[in-house]
Amino acid sequence: MIYLSLLHGKDILNIEKAIPIPIDKLFDFPNHPFKVENDKEMENMVETVKSGGIINPLVVRQREDGNYEIISGHRRKKASQLANLKEVPCIIRKLDDDEATIIMVDSNMQRSKILPSEKAFAYRMKLEAEKHQGKRKDLTSDQFGQKLKNKTTREKVAEELGESSTNIQRYIRLTELIPELLKLVDEERIAFSPAVELSYLTEDEQYVILNIYDYDEKTPNVSQAKHLKLLSQEKKLTSDKIEEIMGEKKANQVEKIKIKAEKIQSLLPKEIKTEKETEEFIIKCIKEHNHREERRREISR
């Protein structure tokens, strides 16, 4: 197949030919920050692939061992595997590490839903690649040096991604969180702003925060997180102090209802997999129950 594509960063059209490549020769991009989930969206993609194949080819580059590295199309590869395809159409490009990283991030930023952790690592990878590319181009191109003279690399990346420069920095801070806390941010158990402040804590201090959450599901608000950060920077933050700050009653705080997972897992529909989906399903069931009870009372009057 022949495809017309816009060359990355250039306003000219490029004619590219897609060729079939065996799936077992395709490997993920190193440290690929975007998750490939077996969710409802993936199920729909698999059905689409089964009925019409891969319409949009993957973008890859060849490795030294003769196999290929995926630049764009990790989800399409997964859907193809689940659809039992043996090969998929791919466009092969000659790209250095920085060019490949930038295209990988930019292509995945078109997704409808992107988790905070995905943004965090993607923004960091793109910023590092752009900085490295900028240093190389500054040595060979006066024009490029003039363009960046009054603009930082982070500001340039922010413009390209449609984010503020400050937000880029704040998202990248999340990469300093321990994986367990970052997962809680993705699950919306810890809000974004407090999470940024917690990223300044040491690893040991962050594990104390995690232990408190595991015990009674307490998470800090912005004020508490800033207090924790300040004490940490002053080398005055102890486990007892963390517990004391986390134990402070928040405004409008209400007691949480805890349900053991093993008591309800067997009762949930198979498509319900995450904590957030479980919570939403339970709330929906309660609303439907209340509605039925209200109707029953109206009929009995």
Image (cartoon, helix red, strand yellow):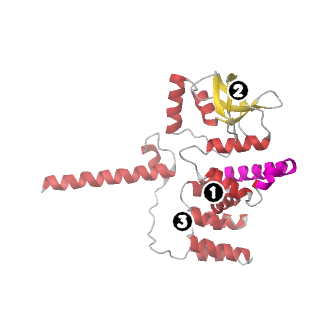
Residue shown at the point (76%, 49%) measured from the top left: 129
Looking at the picture, which amino acid does disc 3 mark? Asp
Of the residues under marks 1 and 3, which one precedes in the sequence?
Answer: 1
Distance, label 1 to label 3, CA atoms, is: 18 Å
Q: Quadrant of the N terminus?
A: top right
Residue 237 can be seen, yes or no: no
Residue at the spot of label 1 = 182
Q: Position of residue 88 (x, y in %)?
A: 64, 24
Residue at the spot of label 3 = 216
Residue in the foreground of this view, choosing between 85 and 286: 85
Distance, label 3 to label 2, CA atoms, is: 45 Å
Span shown in magenta: 120-146
Residue shown at the point (73%, 74%) measured from the top left: 233
Q: Quadrant of the C terminus?
A: bottom left
Is disc 1 placed on a helix, strand or loop? helix
Tell me which corner region of the image, top left, top right, bottom left or bottom right, holds residue 226. bottom right
Q: Is residue 290 magenta?
A: no
Looking at the picture, which amino acid does disc 2 mark? Asp
Of the residues under marks 3 and 2, which one precedes in the sequence?
Answer: 2
